[in-house]
Image (cartoon, rainbow, N blue to C red):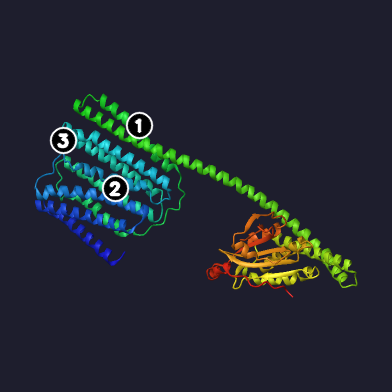
């Protein structure tokens, strides 16, 4: 509590002490009555200001809670000002059948709504919407109760004695309901909320007890404004300021107790009880022959009007409930379908994991004989052989290297977990792959043409895995080349947000990128034999495909995403003129 709040509270306490002394010492007089009315109005205005301060500094449901409390206290303050107007300005007694009594009766309804909101527990939007409808239903019921038992004796057939008796009974029932609600919240919470509800309960109990004592004194003609019977009432009004200033304005911690759905069920049941009570009140109205006929007609009309309004509210509540149930059913069905798909994906993942483990083990076992075959083929190439034998030995070495590359790709594909990725230069990978495959294409007298785009953007990937992809693709093309094809072309370029690697074999030089830029791609050819490479490229966000050009050349096309930091500076590289193709030495 800051200094300003302490001064505020000290002022209220000083005024309260002065009032208590005046009530005990001063005799009955107009000055004492005026002083009492003004002090009580001041206490209520101070309480409204203290609670409004909390409402303005809070958010969400807490703001709604404090706003409802401010609304109820404002009704109370309005009634007190009207009472003061009669006694101070008009200098006459408040009428026995005072029209402003309905304001005093209604002041507890927003406060009951505040505690029914239960801001100390977590509630979803759906429960909050239904809670507002239930509160509106109960509010209409309280207004109907007032119109049923109080208003007839005030306007239809005026009777001061019956009016006072019925008003006091209705207000007592309302205060009892409010006290029971505060007691339930006090018992069901702890910490900050327990202290708050206890303070509100003690304040309300003090005021209710003081009201009962004051009514008892009024019935015996012993009450006057400013008497010691007003001391409990003034203490309760001053207590409001203490509650408002002592409470923190921030969002308090929610109650840690588990919230059951029973509360919402009981609120709905109370609403249904309110609806079903209307026929009982109508039956009571018809059977009560002691009241005048005009009052019975008025009560029946009020019952029919309340039944219509509450019936509309019940319809809206049921409509909202049906809508929410349908939405939840659709959500449940969608969740069930997603669960089924997830289960299928998990089974497929387990199968792939088993296959990967099997492939990894088989590839490890194949590495030893393949290494031996590769060594023997190299030794065989270094011996004196006839040209025909030399060609066959080169073909054996080529097939063994192709098999070794395929096994390495399978091992990389079957490896668990993503590999570490770093920025890479695709041109460097291509040059390295060409150098490593030189023993495969050199004996076949092939010409390797390299059309590598300058200033190619970096790609993010694993160097070993992408190098295996390049080796595998080059080996595949060398294996698929016939006797008439002597040119193996490798091109890199940028297209959109991807770096391209184009590989094709032909019987004459061609410009692959120029064909792509000119839109000469014709159809997608069969991508068979690229599954191992495709698995690695998918981990890098890329893809591989075979594209058939209009000149019947089948080209392997690899796309890898360029790094965003350098993509914009190199997007024009796609339209660059290709450099003159030159064979590797």
Report x, y in % for residue 136: 32, 41
For residue 571, side relative to residue 157 (left or right): right
For residue 402, side relative to residue 199 (left or right): right
Report x, y in % for residue 185: 38, 48
Q: Which residue is mark 2?
A: 205
Q: Is residue 204 visible?
A: yes
Q: Which residue is mark 3?
A: 160
Q: Earlier in the sequence, mark 1 or mark 2?
A: 2
Residue 536 falls in which quadrant of the image?
bottom right
Between circles 1 and 2, the one closer to the viewer is 1
Q: Between marks 1 and 2, how big is the CA–CA gap?
A: 30 Å
Compare residues 449 and 4 and report the one nearer the observer: 449
Q: Which residue is mark 1?
A: 276
Q: Circles 1 and 3: CB distance less than 8 Å?
A: no
Task: Answer few, some or many: residues within 10 Å of disc 1's Cα (few below 14, many 20 plus, some between 14 and 19).
Answer: few
Q: Circles 3 and 2: CB distance less than 8 Å?
A: no
């Amino acid at each position: 509590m800051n200094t300003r709040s302490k001064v505020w509270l000290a002022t209220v306490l000083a005024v309260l002490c002065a009032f208590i002394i005046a009530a005990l010492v001063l005799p009955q007089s107009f000055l004492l009555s005026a002083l009492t009315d003004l002090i009580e109005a001041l206490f209520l205005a101070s309480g409204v200001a203290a609670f409004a301060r909390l409402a303005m500094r809070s958010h969400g449901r807490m703001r709604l809670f404090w706003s409802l409390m401010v609304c109820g206290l404002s009704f109370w303050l309005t009634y007190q000002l009207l009472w003061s107007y009669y006694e101070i300005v008009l200098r006459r007694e408040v009428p026995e059948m005072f029209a402003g009594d309905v304001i005093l009766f209604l002041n507890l309804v927003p406060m009951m709504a505040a505690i029914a909101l239960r801001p100390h527990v977590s509630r979803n939007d759906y429960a909050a919407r239904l809670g507002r409808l239930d509160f509106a239903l109960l509010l209409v019921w309280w207004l109907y109760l007032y119109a049923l038992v109080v208003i007839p004796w005030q306007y239809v057939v005026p009777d001061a004695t019956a009016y006072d008796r019925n008003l006091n009974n209705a207000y007592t029932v309302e205060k009892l309901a409010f006290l029971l609600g505060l007691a339930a919240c006090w018992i069901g919470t702890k910490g900050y909320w327990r202290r708050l509800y206890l303070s509100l309960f003690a304040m309300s109990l003090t005021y209710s007890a003081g009201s009962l004592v004051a009514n008892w004194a009024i019935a015996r003609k012993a009450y006057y404004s400013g008497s010691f019977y007003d001391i409990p009432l003034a203490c309760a009004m001053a207590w409001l300021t203490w509650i408002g200033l002592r409470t923190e304005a921030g969002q308090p911690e929610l109650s840690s107790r588990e919230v059951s759905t029973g509360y919402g069920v009981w609120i709905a049941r109370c609403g249904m009880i309110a609806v079903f009570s209307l026929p009982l009140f109508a039956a009571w109205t018809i059977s009560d022959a002691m009241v005048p006929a005009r009052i019975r007609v008025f009560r029946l009309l009020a019952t029919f009007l309340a039944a219509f309004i509450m019936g509309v509210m019940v319809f809206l509540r049921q409509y909202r409930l049906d809508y929410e149930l349908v939405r939840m059913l659709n959500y449940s069905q969608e969740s069930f379908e997603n669960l089924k798909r997830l289960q299928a994906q998990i089974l497929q993942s387990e199968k792939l994991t088993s296959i990967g483990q099997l492939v990894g083990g088989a590839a490890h076992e194949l590495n030893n004989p393949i290494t031996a075959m590769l060594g023997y083929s190299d030794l065989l190439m270094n011996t004196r052989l006839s040209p025909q034998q030399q060609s066959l030995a080169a073909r054996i070495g080529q097939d063994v290297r192709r098999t070794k590359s395929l096994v390495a790709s399978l091992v990389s594909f079957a490896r668990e977990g993503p590999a570490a990725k770093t920025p890479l230069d695709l041109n460097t990978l291509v040059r390295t792959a060409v150098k490593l495959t030189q023993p495969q294409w050199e004996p076949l007298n092939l010409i390797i043409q390299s059309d590598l785009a300058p200033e190619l953007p970096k790609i993010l990937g694993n160097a070993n895995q992408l190098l295996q992809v390049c080796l595998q693709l080059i080996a595949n093309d060398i294996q698929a080349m016939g006797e008439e094809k002597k040119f193996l072309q490798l091109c890199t370029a940028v297209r959109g947000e991807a770096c391209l690697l184009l590989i094709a074999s032909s019987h004459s030089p061609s410009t692959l990128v120029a064909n792509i830029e000119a839109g000469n791609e014709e159809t997608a050819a069969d991508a068979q034999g690229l599954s191992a490479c495709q698995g690695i490229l998918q981990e890098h966000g890329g893809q591989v495909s075979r594209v058939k050009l209009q000149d019947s050349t089948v080209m392997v096309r690899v796309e890898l995403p360029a790094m965003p930091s350098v993509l914009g500076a190199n997007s024009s590289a796609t339209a660059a003129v290709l450099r003159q193709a030159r064979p590797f030495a």
